[in-house]
Structure formats: C-alpha cells, structure tokens
Image: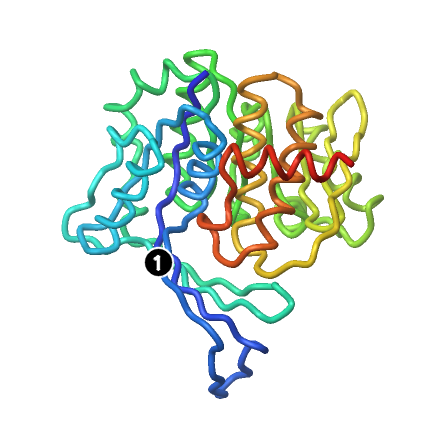
Amino acid sequence: MKIAVIGSTMMDVVSYVDKIPEAGETRESQDFHIAGGGKGANQAIAAAKLGANVLFVTAVGDDLFGRACRKNYEKCGIDTRYVMTAKDMPNGVASIFVEASGQNRIVITKGANNALTPECLKDAEAAIALCGLIVLQLEIPLETIYAAIKIGRAHGIPVLLNPAPAVHNLDIAMACQCDFFVPNETELSILTDCPVGTEEELCRAANTLIEKGLKNVIVTMGAQGSLWLSTAGVQKVAARHVKAVDSTGAGDSYIGCFAETWSRTNNILESMQRASLYAAMSVTRPGTQNSYADQEEFARYLVQNSK
C-alpha cells in the first residue's frame, strides 16, 4: 500500500545549548548542524526508511536548501514526481535550539511551503488516488489541507491529520472527515481550550473531539506514552523510558512509523506500539531525519527491547 504524505519541507538549522538564552542574552552553542526537516518531510522519510512506498507532495525553495531537500528525498527512495520547486521563493527554514535535557525550542519560516496551494494538488490527484493512506500536518496552507481531505473522501482513502503546529482556526468539521487525528498534549489543549495536566483531563479534552465526530483520536504524550480514544473507549500504550539526547522530530517519527505499520496491518494498537518504540529510539540520537532508524536498525532494536 502506498502512502501519500502531503506537507511541509524545511531545512533545520540546529544549535545545541546548555540553556536557552534569556531576552537580550548571548550564549555559546556547544554544537551546530544543518539538516533536512519539516513535519511533512520528517514523516515521509521515517515511513520510507521503514520500507513504506511513499509519494511526497510538497514545495521546496528555488535555492540551495530546496535542491538539497529534493536530493535527500530521492536518496531515501521517495516518489518525488510532485515535489514542486516554488520559483523565486526560499525554502522553509526551522531555527531550532536544543537544551542539554533534550528539550527544544523551534521557530519556523514557511517560505516555499506557502506555495503549496490547492491547485498544486490537482496535478497530483490521480497519483494520490492510487494510495491507501493520506498523511497531513499543518505547516502548509489550511486550504490545501482541506483540499487533501476532500480528495481522500472522494476516493475512499483513509486520512491521518497531525494538527501540528496547532491553530485555533482549524475547521473541526473538516477534521472530522479524517480517520485519524493525532495531536500531542499541547496541540490538544489549544484545539479544545481544555486543560490537559492529567490523564483524566486529557481524556476529557479528547472526548470533546470524539463527540464532535472524530473517529480515532490518538494523543501522543512523549515519555508518558500515547492514548487512543474512540467511541469504543480508551486504550493506552506506554512509552519506553530512554535517555533523551534530542527530542526534535520525535512526534514526526511516531507518525511516520504509525503510518507505515497501519498501512500494512490495519491494526491501530500494534501501530501505536511500534511507533512508540520508534520514537523512543529517535530521541537517543541527535538530529531529526538522521536520527530515524531504517528497517534493519529498528528490527534489531525491537529484538533487544523484547527481552
């Protein structure tokens, strides 16, 4: 089953610091690197590294970063027929600061991602229609997200929406047409205006979305695991506790692994369990896409952690 990821391309500019500077303060970085990023790209590459057949619909910049991102997608075996180059526009950029604890702060400049309009999906629709799952995030225009959801519905393709970064003006009625809605705790709180400080509060907040018509809400909670809520009830998948080096892109690794596993198994709980382990593995390595394991690495990790 082929997976269509429709979403963002970024170049990550990452600095590792002992502490985030205060306002007006300058601090020295212990390390620095530049690498491909963006929620759409991260999820596409995670799924592809795990063996999924991935079609990526995105927009890259008409610059050095854009060319490097396209080359990286090709290297990962991703179908790049609908990776559009936005003329005279810079590639999207994410400025990332990672503290010693592994926590991060991120500022994004969308750049060429704003050029991924609903019209761009018209050329790709025939290819998308041959896929078995559509994966979306919110770093591209909302109108494009809604157009992708409509394509999914028109062709009977399940849709997974990762509402990140969360926006208050997301049309929940459109989101309810998706088969999977996968926010983290912060995104869930923003979208529902509900507190999420405890697991009980998380469940109450997620259930407000179930009541509005969402089929499956999967809340990722980092080291606390993930929750799956539907009209059938709640199920929890625990996270494996590891020493985090860099949490950047962990949520995207979860989505990518979930998509790859579900596309093969149609089993939500198994997909969550594998995704949780894959995300745990990713945070033990620095970087984003380069922290994602391939099939062989992940298979060894699963064997080691089954003992």
x%, y% of residue 145?
42, 34
- In which quadrant is the C terminus drawn? top right
**Residue at the extreme right:** 200
Q: Residue at x 51, y 29 (%)?
A: 174
Q: Is residue 1 left or right of residue 59?
A: right
| Snapshot quadrant of residue 76 | top left
Label 1: state its secondary structure: strand
Q: Is residue 253 above or below residue 19?
A: above
Q: Is residue 86 above or below residue 177?
A: below
x%, y% of residue 1?
46, 16
What colouring does the structure picture have? rainbow
Q: Residues within 10 Å of mark 1 (few under 14, many from 20)?
A: many
Q: Residue at x 40, y 51 (%)?
A: 37
Which residue bears the numbered disc 1?
A: 93
x%, y% of residue 68?
25, 50
Task: Out of 21 and 71, give the one closest to the viewer.
Answer: 71
**Residue at the extreme bottom:** 25
Q: Residue at x 39, y 39 (%)?
A: 7
x%, y% of residue 57?
32, 33
Residue type highlighted by circle 1 = Val
| Snapshot quadrant of residue 79 | top left
Q: Is residue 101 left or right of residue 14?
A: right
Labels in figure, total? 1
Q: Is residue 30 above or below residue 141?
A: below
Q: Is residue 294 above or below residue 69?
A: above
Task: Out of 151 and 49, give the one closest to the viewer.
Answer: 49
